[in-house]
Image (cartoon, helix red, strand yellow):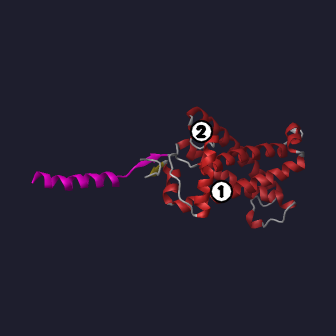
Amino acid sequence: MAASNSTPVSIAATEASENRLQTGYEHPWAVRFCHWLNTVSLFVMAASGLRIFRNLLNVPASLTLGGWLGGALQWHMTFAWIYVATGVFYFAYQIFSRNYRQPLFVPKDLAGVWPMIRHYFFFGRKPAQTEVYNPLQKMAYTSAILLGLLSVMTGIVLYNPVQFSFLATLIGGFHWARVWHFCVLCALLLFVLGHLIMVILHGWNNFTSMLTGWKRNPEYLP
């Protein structure tokens, strides 16, 4: 009789173990703070920057910010300083906390890029995930950081081309600094679009994790 009672208890224990809620702390507060502040800064700079570029491009006024050239410059420069300060804080936190190993794309991740592309765009089998970010995400995030650095470098040239003439020379001159600055903006906006699509495809759980830091039942946990 004792033997017959042991089976249901064992099954119940197994089911409870399999159905238990697991959480992973993916995003420290500093990363979340920088993420949201930089998001706001990027969109303000994009809208005000498009207003500044209206003397070169026929951009609809509804997509711009500032009302006129002077107003757009004030918005742009104010949030550019916020953008830079947030970036410096982000870099310092990542280095001193050693959290940079989480999103940084390194050579060993290269082999995992194509399997993720095949999964996302060609309905291939999804590779097993053993880290917080898969190789394609790491490549995207590392590229976004490099684009951010390039946006600051080209922005400095546009802000003061005489004082930073050595940077202007590296870029190809003041005119090319404007071109590169606009191209970087387009690349960052494409990154944001792709990022939003991935968040939608992966579900609400990914969005809330960037608010709370915790993610429910992440794939990389056993």
Q: Secondary structure at mark 2?
A: helix
State whether residue 116 is above or below residue 30.
Answer: below
Residue 5 occupies quadrant? bottom left
Tag 1 or tag 2, which sits nearer the N-term?
2
Residue 91 occupies quadrant? top right
Q: Mark 1 packing: few (<14 Cα in 10 Å), some, or many (20+)?
A: some
Does the magenta stretch mainly form a helix, a strand or a loop? helix
Q: Secondary structure at mark 1?
A: helix
Write the start and end of the magenta stretch as one range: 1-25
- Residue 4 visible in the picture: yes
**Horizontal and vertical percent position of residue 103:** 59, 44
Left or right, 132 with respect to 104, comes to left
State whether residue 210 is above or below residue 163.
Answer: below
Count of picture labels: 2
Is residue 212 a member of the stretch shown in magenta? no
Mark-to-mark CA distance, 2 and 1? 20 Å
Q: Which mark is residue 22?
A: none
Residue displayed at 90% across by 45% down: 173
- Residue 106 visible in the picture: no
Towards the viewer: 139 or 205: 139
Left or right, 36 with respect to 131, comes to right
Residue that numbered label 1 is attached to: 192
Residue type, numbered disc 1: Val
**Horizontal and vertical percent position of residue 51:** 79, 59
Towards the viewer: 20 or 173: 20
Residue that numbered label 2 is attached to: 100
**Horizontal and vertical percent position of residue 28:** 52, 42
Residue displayed at 45% across by 46% down: 24
**Horizontal and vertical percent position of residue 212:** 48, 50
State whether residue 122 is above or below residue 1.
Answer: below
